[in-house]
């Protein structure tokens, strides 16, 4: 793999000597600091002076409540601590040192150490800025956004609350321009929303909760936007926003630090940890505009903080939401003039959904240096989606068949008598999502910090297909099918240790063991199997003198999982990493990581990361990183089988087509082989600047090369096999290159009462090449075109907040660049700006009332002709969406 922006050539992926070199480097660096050099830094000399003493203090907010977890650092060093459960801290310092106290959502404060040994410190609330402390991307002490060597976004709970959409995925799309999401649409993608970070598939972004890996969804996206096709990712939509203290988004490759999937970046969802207080939110939203119905959304959410003795907390959050189905289409062309047909006969728009989402977070101090913790979630959600309309006379389902499959002389039967206006299958998904993490962390007497944890997570979707038929079972066909559940479960064990070998060097290492299990459950027999009427196409219809039409051989709309294709499939791996951070001096930081990961099924991979930050002045910092990355194929991608039985057009005999395992002998005969991990090379460089205390600016360029990218092939023709006409399978087919830049700037004015923020992303993905199978390109030209053109290359979000006192206001403009539709003549979809507004009124110290509107101007993407005959006037998978505007009202009640 070559780095085109440099004049040198690197080929670091899968080279074990990188791991050996990294181990030796860490040992040599660590040893040198452990014994200390002859040139002792001035900061160390100061800490050993006669003025050295122990100080204590308490950090509180404006209401006098303790702030738990506030960071207390000696300015100019990495020496520091965090406040305890009662807001207290203790720290060794010198007279004349300056301590910096910071906490998310509050203005930082600096206090010089004088003769006093105890301090009471009150923090005031402030807007998000670059001096916020983050924990993602570092295993040393938490660092501020501006001092991080890679770009990190930090979104606090207040920013998340300023989103009236009730959808965490949509919230992130508004806040992070390099993150995008397309509408819920099509098969399982109707229940798990397709997303993308930097134009890459969602399973190339690692999802963490409280810095622990989150389990995947059970859905493998066979259907959806091109960037999402075949992806097997975690579903962030299962997390209620009320449970979150903040979200940290690391926009850089981090596989060497965190393992598989962290090619595009990392999203870390940090849970609330208050031990007191109650917050209740209620919201109602009304959609409007363009002659569509006034559909309504409802949401109720609550968060409760409880003490666990005097040294612990239990924080519980829950959310129940109900969203009506949105209808944004026109009448299907085949339904026009059909008596008794519903208008529209098939629906285009967000599916109906509802569900309960809960999260808990708990911790308790067992002794002075030992804490036990646990957190997790339980969600039970539901979705209902409409498939394509089947008009009267539909081939294979609404045509006559004989009453007796062996004797046409006994007359005919036709489901068209039961469905004279045709029918539209309805697809339901009942989803259960569970996770739990249990761990213990602390600090040993010799200075080593440790964290031992176990994680279990599972996601199961129970599918039900209503209002459908398997006409090969004649008059005995079911109309309600259970095509087979899918389930993903993950089991992780982590052991992490770290130690500050000096004020300048932190060493971390750890071990991980993980097992992923993907399960396909068999569906109803009629959902996948041909019945007694399967071969009636060989018989002559006495009423017409021609052969009967071949009936469908599975549940119409969504064929089920056959018994022989069901089962549980495991993937196991272990990993070892080393991670070091070296503050060479106050201005220069070097961050290094190496990781070896071994998969039972897929082999091993070695990865590294080197990142650095150099502070030219207190107003300007340069930063950059080079890293290799990987994404291991999931057990689902390696084993999923979806077979549909149909008829050969020439012979009239039954044949099969669909997706099979890449190691199936038939796939191997067409060039299939066992999947191996994707390989990536990630390069980024940029700067962070704070020209004034009110203005911040970051600009980062990046290039991500992904080799052996896993994607499902197109349907490849099968020659000489009587059972199959075509097949598809997963393969390491594509080599892609993604380039872009991120610009983020913030401005505070009017003594912090008015805040502006601008975030801009330019992103371009190019398919460099693909590896052929049996002399053929396994991925179609159309899919490659869509990968390169379906998402906008430019995205921006401009937001202003102003505090009037009891009233505050927000206005945000979301810009989407032009795209090209995925089908037909590939019509261009022009750029668009969506405006969101919100007003918040503090009715009392405990009650806030919020009125707002998303897409207040009710803008839609350009209308196109691609699917107008099917009733869809808009591009189906545009990230702009085609749902129109919504006005909402929310009440928030807080009890201390």
Image: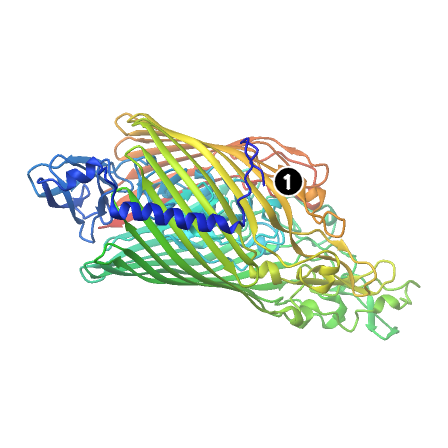
User: In the image, is 650 to the left or to the right of 102?
Assistant: right
Locate the N terminus by quadrant. Answer: top right
Q: 177 or 619, which lies in front?
A: 619
User: In the image, is 317 to the left or to the right of 307?
Assistant: right
Residue 305 to residue 610: above or below? below
Q: Residue 714: give x, y in percent of width and height.
A: 71, 51
Residue extending furthest toward the right: 545
User: Which residue is rendered at x = 67% and y = 45% of the image?
Assistant: 770
Residue 525 to residue 277: above or below? below
Res. 106 in view:
yes
Res. 745 in view:
no
Q: How is the image coloured?
A: rainbow
Classify residue 633 by image quadrant.
bottom right
Secondary structure at numbered mark 1 = strand
Pointer 1: what residue? 767
Q: 437 or 578, which lies in front?
A: 578
Classify residue 395 by image quadrant.
bottom right
Residue 879 to residue 796: above or below? below
Residue 768 to residue 89: above or below? above
User: Which residue is rendered at x = 84% and y = 65% of the image?
Assistant: 653
Q: Residue 713: give x, y in percent of width and height.
A: 68, 52
Q: Residue 763: give x, y in percent of width and height.
A: 54, 35
Residue extending furthest toward the front: 38
User: Which residue is rendered at x = 64% and y = 71% of the image?
Assistant: 524
């Amino acid at each position: 793999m070559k780095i085109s922006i440099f004049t040198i050539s690197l080929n670091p992926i899968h080279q074990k000597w990188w791991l050996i070199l990294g181990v030796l480097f860490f040992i040599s660096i660590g040893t040198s600091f452990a014994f200390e050099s002859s040139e002792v830094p001035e900061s160390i000399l100061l800490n050993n002076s006669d003025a050295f003493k122990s100080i204590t203090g308490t950090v509180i907010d404006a209401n006098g409540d303790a702030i738990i977890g506030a960071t207390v650092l000696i300015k100019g060093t990495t020496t520091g601590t965090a406040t305890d459960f009662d807001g207290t801290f203790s720290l060794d310092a010198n007279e004349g040192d300056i301590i910096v106290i910071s906490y998310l959502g509050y203005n930082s404060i600096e206090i010089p150490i004088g003769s006093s040994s105890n301090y009471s410190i009150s923090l005031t609330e402030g807007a998000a800025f670059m001096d916020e402390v983050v924990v993602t991307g570092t295993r040393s002490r938490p660092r501020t956004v501006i001092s991080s060597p890679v770009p990190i976004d930090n979104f606090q709970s207040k920013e998340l609350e300023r989103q009236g959409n009730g959808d965490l995925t949509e919230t992130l799309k508004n806040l992070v321009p390099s993150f995008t999401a397309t509408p819920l649409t099509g098969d399982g993608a109707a229940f798990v929303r397709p997303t993308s970070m930097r134009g890459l598939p969602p399973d190339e972004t690692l999802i963490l909760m409280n810095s622990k890996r989150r389990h995947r969804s059970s859905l493998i996206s066979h259907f959806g936007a091109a960037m999402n096709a075949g992806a097997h990712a975690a579903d962030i939509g299962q997390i209620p926003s009320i449970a979150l203290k903040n979200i940290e988004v690391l926009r850089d490759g981090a596989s060497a630090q965190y393992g598989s999937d962290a090619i595009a970046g990392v999203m870390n969802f940090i849970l609330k940890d208050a031990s007191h207080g109650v917050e209740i939110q209620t919201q109602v939203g009304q959609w409007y505009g363009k002659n569509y119905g006034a559909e309504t959304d409802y949401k109720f959410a609550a968060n409760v903080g409880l003490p666990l003795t005097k040294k612990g907390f239990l924080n519980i959050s829950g959310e129940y939401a109900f969203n009506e189905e949105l209808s944004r289409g026109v009448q299907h062309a085949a339904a026009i003039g059909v008596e008794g047909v519903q208008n529209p006969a098939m629906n285009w728009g967000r599916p109906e959904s509802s569900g309960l989402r809960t999260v808990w977070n708990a911790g308790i101090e067992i002794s002075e240096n030992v804490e036990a913790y646990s957190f997790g979630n339980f969600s039970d959600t539901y979705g209902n989606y409409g498939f394509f309309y089947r008009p009267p006379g539909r081939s294979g389902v609404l045509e006559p068949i004989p009453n007796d499959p062996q004797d046409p002389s006994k007359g005919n039967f036709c489901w068209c008598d039961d469905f004279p206006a045709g029918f539209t299958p309805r697809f339901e998904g009942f989803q259960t999502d569970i996770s739990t993490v249990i761990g213990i962390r602390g600090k040993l007497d010799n200075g080593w910090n440790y964290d031992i944890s176990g994680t279990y997570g599972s996601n199961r979707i129970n599918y039900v297909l209503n209002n459908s038929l398997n006409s090969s079972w004649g008059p005995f066909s079911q109309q309600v099918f259970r095509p087979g559940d899918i389930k993903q479960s993950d089991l992780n064990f982590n052991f992490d240790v770290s130690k500050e070998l000096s004020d300048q060097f932190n060493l971390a290492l750890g071990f991980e063991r993980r097992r992923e299990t993907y399960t396909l459950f068999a569906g109803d027999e009629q959902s996948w199997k041909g019945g007694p009427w399967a071969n009636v196409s060989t018989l002559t219809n006495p009423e017409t003198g021609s052969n009967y039409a071949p009936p469908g051989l599975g549940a119409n709309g969504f064929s089920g999982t056959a018994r022989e294709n069901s089962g549980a499939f495991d993937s196991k791996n272990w990993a070892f990493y080393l991670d070091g951070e070296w503050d060479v001096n106050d201005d220069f930081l070097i961050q290094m990581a190496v990781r070896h990961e071994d998969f039972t099924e897929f082999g091993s991979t070695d990865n590294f990361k080197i990142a650095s930050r150099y502070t030219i002045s207190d107003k300007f910092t340069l930063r950059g990183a080079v890293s290799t990355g990987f994404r291991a194929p999931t057990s689902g991608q390696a084993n999923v089988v979806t077979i549909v039985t149909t008829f050969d057009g020439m012979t009239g005999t039954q044949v099969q087509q669909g997706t099979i395992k890449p190691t199936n002998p038939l796939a191997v005969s067409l060039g299939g082989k066992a999947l191996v991990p994707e390989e990536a090379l990630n390069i980024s460089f940029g700067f962070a600047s704070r020209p004034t205390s009110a203005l911040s600016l970051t600009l980062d360029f990046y290039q991500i090369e992904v080799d052996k990218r896993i994607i499902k092939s197109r349907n490849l023709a099968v020659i000489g096999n009587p059972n199959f006409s075509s097949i598809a399978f997963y393969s390491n087919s594509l080599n892609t290159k993604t380039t872009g830049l991120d610009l983020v700037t913030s401005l505070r004015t009017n003594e912090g009462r008015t805040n502006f923020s601008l975030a801009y992303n330019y992103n371009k993905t190019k398919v460099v090449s693909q590896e052929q199978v049996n002399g053929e390109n396994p991925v179609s030209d159309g899919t490659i075109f869509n990968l390169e053109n379906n998402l906008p290359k430019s995205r921006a979000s401009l937001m202003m907040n102003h505090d009037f006192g009891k009233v505050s206001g927000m206005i945000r403009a979301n810009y989407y660049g032009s795209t090209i539709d995925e089908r037909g003549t590939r019509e261009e979809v022009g750029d668009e700006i969506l405006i969101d507004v919100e007003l918040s009124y503090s009715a009392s110290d405990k009650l806030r009332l919020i009125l707002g509107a998303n897409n207040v101007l009710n803008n839609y993407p350009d209308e196109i002709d691609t699917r107008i005959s099917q009733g869809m006037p808009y591009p189906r998978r545009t990230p702009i969406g085609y749902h129109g505007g919504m006005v909402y009202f929310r009440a928030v009640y807080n009890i201390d």
